[in-house]
Amino acid sequence: MTDRKTLGQASAIGIVVSSMVGAGLYTTSGFALADLKSPALVLLAWGIAGVIALCGAIGYGALTRQFQESGGEYLYLSKTVHPAVGFLAGIISIVAGFTGAIAFAAITLEASLIDLLNSSHKIPSGLIATTVVILAALQHLFRVRIGSQLQNGIVLFKLMLLLIFIAVSFTQFPDQWESWTTKSPFDASSVTLSTFATSLMWISFSYCGFNAAIYCAGEIKETDQTVPRALLIGTLLVVGLYVCINAVFVYAAPYDQVAGQEQIATIVAGDIAGNGFAWLMGLVIVISLYTSVSVSMMIGPRVLARMAEDGNLPNWFCFQGETPRIAICLQAIASILFIQVTTLRELLTYLSFTLSLCSAITVGSVLLNRQVSQTVLWQKMAAGLFTIATLIISFLGASRNPRESAAGFMTILVGLLIYWLISRNRANLSRE
């Protein structure tokens, strides 16, 4: 049997960082600013969501020390709660966590690339996004090491460009920072709890890749040490990066220029240092979004493969050589279908709500199950804080966005129905 443990610490951290730094970073603050009407509140939300994500990383790390195989929430909940709950988590991961996330990143990449090229030629909607999905599938179709090495190189280049953006932003006009930070005072009087929760839910989606390494844990060396460390280090790096970048986004341009805008990053970059800097920011966004598509295309099919190995899906989803090739192809096809039928804001709300519920239940299992025996008190406290905060934010956000939240509940019901049909078929076969 081929040894699948080919990924090291750097690759594990790279998976986490590239999963997190994506479409949400470059779009969410514009939507949040329109709702919260205060840069200070938006930045507060990014900070709160960062603390919650760190708690979640600690909780997932505790689970990984006990269960050192690929599969993510599907594996954890099947082992700690019930196979039906694990199967449901697997369906949510496939539909929302990877298919929807790939579509979201690809759609945003297309809009960013069109804006970057400033072409007068009419490009059919969805063509660029579809091409990006196909390229990412080809990158990971045959060899794990080649795909991960290319991924690591792109991530390093992306981080270097983002650090340049932060440095230029904080040094280009140092005398203006005082006026920037005072031109929109902290005023929460017009913001309801559900409004803040909705923005916090959107922002939490930008952090949701903090658990990405768990999906390919079975291919990472010294899993019980490497994966928890990668989750924590990767999340800490991204929290610091997010707070710095979003401080620039919400303070460096007039409110009416960026509130509600999808392309807040390039707008702010242009306001700071002109069109050339805006073009550089656009390039950073395109690279970041491609890594988001790529890493989801790498890890998503691993969930399908694990479910197939357990007999919950047809065995042709299993690994063929180093990679689950058929699962990768199916992931690409499903993502392309999502690209054709959804809008950016609707997709953001649906993904945020659905994935938050799944993550809260998974991390909550740390508190309820005795199998996670290595969990110490501070890890349990972190897991508890993540679970409670995520559930409160999700349901407050759902009260303000009933249609997208209903789609999330529909995903759950469909997952349970599929599990019931599979279980019934197994029972009939066993009687025969």
Image: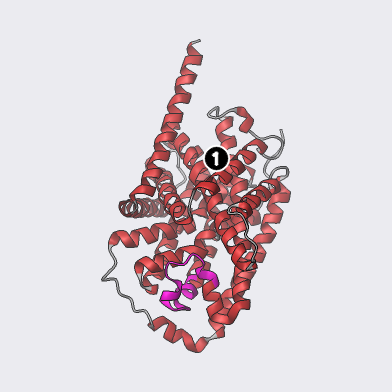
Q: Secondary structure at mark 1?
A: loop
Viewer-side residue, 315 vs 189: 189
The single residue placed furthest to the left in the displayed view is 189
**Quadrant position of residue 318:** top right
Task: State the residue at coordinates (50%, 67%).
Answer: 242
Above or below residue 430? Residue 363 is below
Viewer-side residue, 127 vs 204: 127
Q: Provide the residue span drawn in magenta.
A: 246-266
Task: State the residue at coordinates (65%, 62%).
Answer: 121
Q: Main secondary structure of the magenta part?
A: helix
Q: Which residue is mark 1?
A: 71
Q: Is residue 117 left or right of residue 427?
A: right
Q: Decide whether residue 249 is among the magenta residues.
A: yes
Q: Is residue 136 left or right of residue 242?
A: right
- Few, some or many residues within 10 Å of mark 1 (<14, 14–19, 20+): many
The answer to whether one can see residue 300 in this image is: yes
Task: State the residue at coordinates (52%, 75%).
Answer: 268
The answer to whether one can see residue 14 in this image is: no
**Quadrant position of residue 230:** bottom right
| Residue 4, percent from left and from top | 68, 41
Q: Is residue 104 left or right of residue 203?
A: right
| Residue 296, percent from left and from top | 58, 49
**Quadrant position of residue 99:** top right
